[in-house]
Image: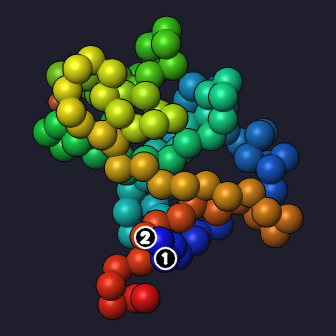
Amino acid sequence: MNYKWQKICESATELENLFLLSKIQTMQVFGTRVCVVKTAEGVYAFRDKCPHNGAALSMGFFNEKEEIVCPLHRYPFDVKTGKATAGMALCLDTFPLKIQDDGVFVGMKKSWWES
Ligand code: FES
């Protein structure tokens, strides 16, 4: 898959310091509003839009299982896989992260006209 990458911070250290555990941070990545969250297992990025009915997941919260819970109908999602964890066949629109010497980047699939 062909990705385009946008830098979100300068280093892994900055990532560690800027992103607080289980706090939802939002940013614009190539014009898309993205949530970036840090859990005990890692840092994950996904679109700030619930796949159920479009609510802003940045207004949600983490439950005790470290799942993001949508503020509208309270469906929980595993931020690691993106999958809904309460039986629905829904999935977050997730984005890969990569950490390199020159920074930390969020990836988005290129559209067919960008390839
Ligand atoms: S809009 Fe998120 S669970 Fe319904």
Q: Position of residue 4 (x, y in %)?
A: 52, 75
Q: Is residue 72 left or right of residue 33?
A: left
- The answer to whether any part of residue 26 appears in the image is no
- The residue at 46%/61% (across/down) is 28
Instruction: Relative to 36, say whether 72 is above or below.
Output: above
The three-letter code of the residue at mark 2 reads: Lys
Q: Position of residue 9 (x, y in %)?
A: 71, 58
- The residue at 21%/33% (across/down) is 89
The one of 42 and 63 positioned closer to us in this rendering: 42
- The quarter of the image that holds ligand 1 is top left
- The residue at 66%/28% (across/down) is 41
Report, in whole angstroms, how far the alpha carbon at label 1 lies from the one at label 2. 6 Å
Is there a contact, CB below 8 Å, between mark 1 and mark 2?
yes
Q: Is residue 95 left or right of residue 41?
A: left
Q: Which mark is residue 2?
A: 1
Instruction: Relative to 54, say whether 85 is above or below.
Output: above
Instruction: Relative to 38, say whether 4 is above or below.
Output: below
